[in-house]
Amino acid sequence: MLGWLPDGPSFRRLLKYNADIPPEASRVNGYIREILERDGESPEKAYDDFASYAGALPLVAYNLSYELGKVLIPEWSRLGIEPIGKTGFCALKLAQRLLDLVPAGNCKLQTLRQYVRRQLSCPVA
């Protein structure tokens, strides 16, 4: 991002862990083991690419404290990888500050995406 505008390509990778994916996780993310084995790459390669992509820039994520503290930092530690980037801002906290979440229903990213899409499509009085 440069200000509020995208600046360059997004970073997306599928990771190949050669492990079973619990059915409840597959229902949420849509991935099954066969997809990850076919299209995924090793975590070490993906994180090396991510380190080149992010450099020392701040990371932005929806629920950043969870993504860093419970997912990425423990994973990087397990793999012996130095932390990548630096803490940026949490898009969830931003949404909670800017939106009236009661009409939205909850703070799930998909719910907020649908709520904002509906709000933007309504004519302004």
Image (tube, helix red, strand yellow):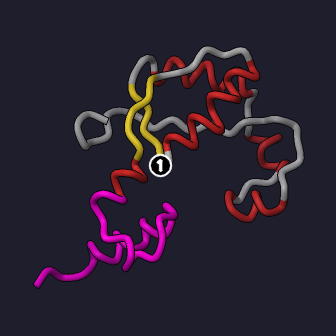
The residue indicated by pointer 1 is 62
Where does the magenta region start and end? 96-125
Assess whether residue 108 is covered by the magenta stretch. yes
CA neighbours of label 1 inside 10 A, class few (<14), some (14 to 19), many (20+): some
Q: Image quarter for residue 50? A: top right
Q: Position of residue 91 (x, y in %)?
A: 40, 49
Q: Residue at x 39, y 33 (%)?
A: 88
Q: Is the residue 53 above or below the residue 67 in the image?
A: above
Q: Residue at x 34, y 77 (%)?
A: 118
Q: Considering the image in quadrants, where does the N terminus appear?
A: top left
Residue 64, percent across and down? 49, 42
Query: In the rendered image, which quarter contains the C terminus?
Result: bottom left
From the image, give the main secondary structure of the stretch colored magenta.
helix
* In the image, residue 119 lies in the stretch drawn in magenta: yes
- For the point 38% across and 76% down, the residue is 102
Q: Residue at x 47, y 49 (%)?
A: 62
**Residue 2 placement, left or right of 111:** left
The residue lying toward the viewer, choosing from 98 and 119, is: 98
Residue 80, given in percent of the width and then of the height, sits at 72, 15
Give the percent coordinates (x, y) of residue 16: 78, 35
